[in-house]
Image (cartoon, grey):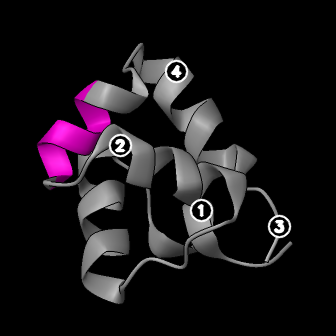
Amino acid sequence: MGRNIKIKVARAELDITQKKLAEKVGISRQTMNAIEQGDYNPTIKLCLGICKVLGKSLDELFGEE
């Protein structure tokens, strides 16, 4: 599993910190960092929560290139 730059870019577009995004989806900032670094594989429910907050689809944030 590689780094998820798409989440970082989507956060930057909305000017949302890792901490703020983590709070909105109910996880720790450390877990959000691990997701972005590719060290943690989130559940589909968590993926959908991240997509909802960032206004993106599953394919946009988690789909393969």
Q: Position of residue 45 (x, y in %)?
A: 24, 82
Residue at mark 3 to residue at mark 1: CA–CA distance: 15 Å
Q: Residue at x 54, y 79 (%)?
A: 41
Q: Position of residue 3 (x, y in %)?
A: 78, 56
Label 3 neighbour load within 10 Å: few <14, some 14-19, many 20+: few
Is 18 situated left or right of 2 in this image? left
Specify which label sits upstream in the sequence, 3 or 1. 3
Specify which label sits upstream in the sequence, 1 or 4. 4
Q: Amino acid at mark 3?
A: Gly
Q: Amino acid at mark 4?
A: Glu
Tag of residue 13: 4
Q: In which quadrant will I find the C terminus?
A: bottom right
Q: Which residue is mark 3?
A: 2
Question: CB under 8 Å between callouts 3 and 2?
Answer: no
Q: Which residues are magenta?
A: 20-25
Q: Quadrant of residue 46?
A: bottom left
Is 52 situated left or right of 34 in this image? left
Q: Position of residue 7 (x, y in %)?
A: 57, 46
Helix, strand or loop status at disc 4: helix
Q: Which residue is mark 1?
A: 60
Residue at mark 4 to residue at mark 3: CA–CA distance: 21 Å
Residue at mark 1 to residue at mark 2: CA–CA distance: 10 Å
Q: Amino acid at mark 2?
A: Leu
Residue at mark 1 to residue at mark 4: CA–CA distance: 14 Å
Magenta region's main secondary structure? helix
Tag of residue 54: 2
